[in-house]
Image (cartoon, rainbow, N blue to C red):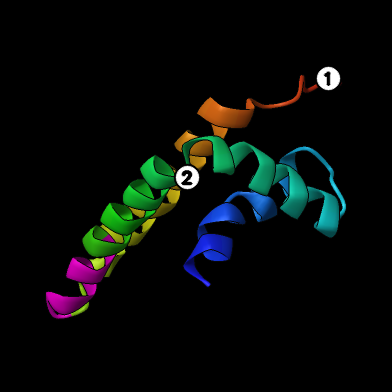
Amino acid sequence: MAYFAVSWTFSSLLAVFHSKESWAAMELSRKMVVKNWFMIFLFVFVVGIIVGAGVLFLGIGIVFTLPLGIYSLYAAFEDIFGLPNMKKT
């Protein structure tokens, strides 16, 4: 179960930024993540620990740690997949 959770970490971001259908995004995420699965697992685990620690500190820490965790996942996504060229109107 953890294998699929880590493998599909970037599927929602692929659907949004690369306009992929849900299953195509899940497959592309899995194919890219499987190359370095353990390192991405550790990354997601550490981000989860940081966000969890924010919840433990009276819940107010979540205000700071949740955006940090989301941005960290986004930065990893951008590093792995890149962003499509956006046309300026």
Pick the front one: 51 or 3: 3
Which one is earlier in the sequence, the residue at label 2 or at label 1?
2
Q: Considering the numbered disc 1 on the image, is that residue within a helix, a strand or a loop?
A: loop
Residue 40 x/y as whole percent: 42, 44
Magenta stretch bounds: 51-58
Q: Quadrant of residue 81?
A: top right
Residue 39 x/y as whole percent: 37, 41
Instruction: Specify the farthest residue to the left.
Output: 57
Pick the front one: 9 or 75: 9
Residue 43 x/y as whole percent: 34, 47
Residue 6 x/y as whole percent: 51, 57
- Amino acid carrying mark 1 in the image: Lys
Q: Residue at x 75, y 25 (%)?
A: 84
Q: Is residue 44 left or right of residue 29?
A: left
Q: Residue at x 12, y 74 (%)?
A: 57
Whether residue 76 appears in magenta in the rendering, the answer is: no
Looking at the image, how many numbered discs can be counted on the residues?
2
The image shows residue 22, relative to residue 60, as above or below, that is above
Q: Is residue 61 left or right of residue 80?
A: left
Which of pointers 2 and 1 indicates the residue nearer the eye? 2
The image shows residue 79, relative to residue 37, as above or below, that is above
Q: Residues within 10 Å of mark 1 (few under 14, many from 20)?
A: few
Residue at image mark 1: 87
Q: Quadrant of residue 18?
A: top right
Q: Considering the numbered disc 2 on the image, is that residue within a helix, a strand or a loop?
A: helix
Q: CA distance from mark 2 to mark 1?
A: 33 Å
- Amino acid carrying mark 2 in the image: Trp
Pick the front one: 25 or 60: 25
Viewport quadrant of the C terminus: top right
